[in-house]
Image (cartoon, rainbow, N blue to C red):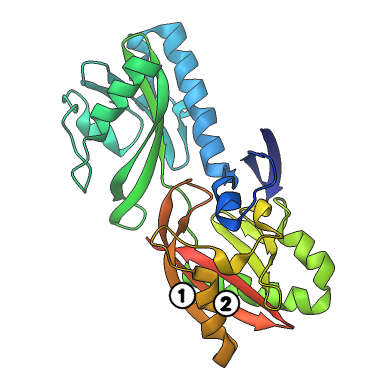
Amino acid sequence: MKTFVIFLGGLAIGATLVFGSLPQSAAAAEEEGAVIKTALEMRAEALLAIAVKHIEDKGEAGVRDFARQSAFVDRDLYAYAVRTDGVFLASGGSSAALVGDNVIDHADSEGKPFFREMIETARSEGRGRVEYRWFNPADSRGEPKVTLFQRVGDVIVAVGYYPPRATPVEAKAMLRDAVKALAADRAATLAEFQHLGGRFIRNDLYVFVVDLESGLFLAHGATPALVGTDAMQLRDPRGELIVLQMAQIAKDDGAGEYDYFWRNPTTGRIESKHTFFRTHNGMLIGVGSYNR
C-alpha cells in the first residue's frame, strides 16, 4: 500500500493506492483499483482528530465546546457527539436540533438506522465510517453522506461530509479537453491521464482510453492496473460488456453516451454512472459522472 498527498486547485488531496500482482484480466484489475481520498475527506479526518483530542483531554463535558468554539467547525464540516447509549450530546452544525434525543433508532431518508450502526461499530471496533443519505442544506435534497467517527470512553465523536460529485456538464468538459490534449500530444497525454496530480483526475472524474484495434486499455485514471488488459471483456456488475457496448455505439456516430454501474473511486462503492465518449485516431475516449 502506498499513500500520496497531491495538490489540486490549491487543495491538498490524499490518495491511497493498493497495488498487487499484475491482474490477469480487466475485471481483476478493476477489483484492485485505487480509492482516491479527496481533500474533503482529509479535512474531515483532520477535524475529527482535533475533536477527539479535545474529548480525550476534557472528557464528556468537553462536547459542549463543539457548539461554542470555531475550532470544531471547518466551513461546511462540523464535529458532533453521541453517547454509546444513543443520546445525542452536542453538535457544531444543523444536527444541534437532535441534542438530548436518543437517536439510536433514528433513520435516514431511506430508512437506514445509521446511528445504530455507528454506535455498534464504535463499541466493537472503536472507530469507523458509516454511509447513509441525508438532507443536504446546500441544495435542499437528500444526498449520500459519509460520517467518520471514533469512540472516546462512552462518547462517540463524529464528523460527516457529502462526497463531492461531478456533474454531467463537467464530465463533458473534461472529455472535450482530453480529446484536444490527445490530438496535440498522444504519448504525453496518455501518461497525464494516469497522473493523480494532473488536471484529468478531479474528485470522481477521470479519463479512460481504449485502443479500438486491439481492444486494450491505453489509460485509466481511476484504475491504472487496467492498462494493457482487454477492455472489450470488461463487464459491470449486471454482466454488461460496457466498453464493447460503447464501441458499438460510437462505430456509427463517433460519439455517444452510456449508462451502467461502476465503482466510484471517491467512495469505493458501486454506483450508477453515465459516461460520455468519443472516438479519435483509433481510440475510444470516455469520461463519466456518477448519478446522484
The residue that appears at 64% across and 74% down in the rendered structure is 285
The residue that appears at 45% across and 21% down in the rendered structure is 51
The residue that appears at 36% across and 31% down in the rendered structure is 92
Cα distance, mark 1 to mark 2? 8 Å
Q: Position of residue 197 (x, y in %)?
A: 72, 51
Q: Position of residue 229 (x, y in %)?
A: 66, 60
Q: Quadrant of residue 42?
A: top right
Which of the image's four quarters has the C terminus?
bottom left
Residue 29 or residue 70, whichever sits in front = 29
Residue 206 or residue 54, whichever sits in front = 206
Q: Would residue 149 be visible to someone looking at this image?
A: no
Q: Which mark is residue 23?
A: none
Residue 283 or residue 123, whichever sits in front = 283
Q: Position of residue 55 (x, y in %)?
A: 42, 13
Q: Would residue 177 be visible to someone looking at this image?
A: yes
- Residue 242 in the figure: left or right of residue 214: left
Pointers 1 and 2 in contact (CB under 8 A)? Answer: yes
Which of the image's four quarters has the N terminus?
top right
- Three-letter residue code for mark 2: Phe
- Residue 114 in the figure: left or right of residue 183: left
Q: Which mark is residue 258?
A: 1
Q: Which mark is residue 277?
A: 2
Q: Residue furthest front?
A: 24
Asked which secondary structure carries label 2, the reply is strand
Q: Position of residue 37 (x, y in %)?
A: 57, 42
Q: Quadrant of residue 78?
A: top left
| Relative height, residue 62 to residue 93 (above, below) | above
- Residue 217 in the figure: left or right of residue 292: right
| Relative height, residue 284 to residue 291 (above, below) | below
Asked which secondary structure carries label 1, the reply is strand
